[in-house]
Amino acid sequence: MKKFSFLLVFTLLLFTACKKDHVDATNTKTLQSSINDMTSSLSTIKQIKFNEALYILKTFGVEADGDINELKALGKLINGKKVPEILSLADEVAQKNGIEWASTAPPSLGEMNIFGDDKAKESDPNDVKAGSISIITQPTGDDGSGAPTAIQIIPRLVDAAGNPVSFTGAGLEATLEVFSNGVRLSTAKNLMQDNNFKGFNLKFSSIPASKVVDNKIDITVSVKTTAKTFKMSKIGLDVNAAALKVPVIPKTDSTAVSQQPSAVVDPNNPSVTTPATTTEPGATTTPSTPAAPKQPATDPKNTVSKFLNSVSSQNLKAAYETSNNPNWGSYESFSNPNSGFGAVKNVSVKNITTSASNANGASVNATYDVTDKTGKTTSLKVTFGLKNVNGDWKISSYKINP
């Protein structure tokens, strides 16, 4: 009998010892198993807050498309972490995204399950009964001239008659997608806990000016309840072109003097360097002056003209080689047929003028029509910033003017 009792206690101890107290993200199965082990050691309230924290991290703490990819990304984020570390990380993510959630607050998001169990429960606050979604848009901010600097986008769940439905204590995933001319520019997420949801504040300064066509954007908002995902779009919202994100033309310090690689430090005065010389004894030397930067031999507008002609003829490699613009990224991004210059079919140049130029930088204004591969033609007024790179003008910035 004693032997049996000893074996029983030993088995229980062994079982307890096998339970994990940290996340094991080797694969989805070990991720779920380790999270279940960690959850089982918590009180009921702590279990709910832990599941809420995991939901916050999966929804807002990682960038991935689809539940499987989100789970993989979540696993990488929390691998090896224990419950207190995960709760603390969720607090940081919630604060960063403006979500009214805290690990120390009472349960507020319903019954969260990051592994995809979306079946409605008797007390599930996310099972909101609605007929559709409506969107309210309001210009906000002032750029000093009376023009807005952002748009407040407020979704509301409504019934079949169009009246707002009432609910509280939910944790509905709300997603905002921003497009221009069919190209997605940005995505944002937030939690809709009731129908007084403040929505999204879309700042124009977060939208690249080079990707906005005709100073208009399209938006799509979706809200996910337990049983259904509601979605609605608004097309052709005006933006303040002057407030859009524009790359800053790099400034060069004209007072800086480049030091020659062969300069030698005077040991008696370390702050002074003298050029190394190889002269014969008794020979007289003349101090050398630093070489001036090589000056471009051509007008900077010639580079812009070459760029536009190359884009028009779809010689995108040649167009890319005229630039030194980090905002255009790699050649693959630059030539992308959907979001890059690969979508252009033809460019008809009307006017190109150099508005400013010095030894280090220049500014060129160009007016032209762009026809994309769908046949749509857009008139553009663009300011190109250029910089001197080893004696050649290179395009370093690109601003679409109103």
Image: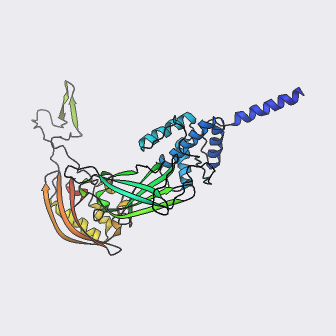
Residue 229 pos. (x, y %): 52, 59
- Of the 4 image quadrants, the one containing the C terminus is bottom left
In the displayed structure, 49 sits above or below 355; it is: above
The answer to whether residue 329 is visible is no
Residue 169 pos. (x, y %): 52, 45
Residue 153 pos. (x, y %): 37, 54
Relative placement, left or right, of 152 versus 100 is left
Q: Nearer the viewer, residue 295 or 124?
A: 124
Residue 175 pos. (x, y %): 45, 55
Q: Nearer the viewer, residue 368 or 362?
A: 368
> Residue lying farthest bottom?
375
- Of the 4 image quadrants, the one containing the N terminus is top right
Could you tell me how many numbered marks the image carries?
Answer: 0
Residue at figure coordinates x 35%, y 57% from the top left: 137
The answer to whether residue 360 is visible is yes
Relative placement, left or right, of 107 versus 43 is left
Residue at figure coordinates x 21%, y 40% from the top left: 260
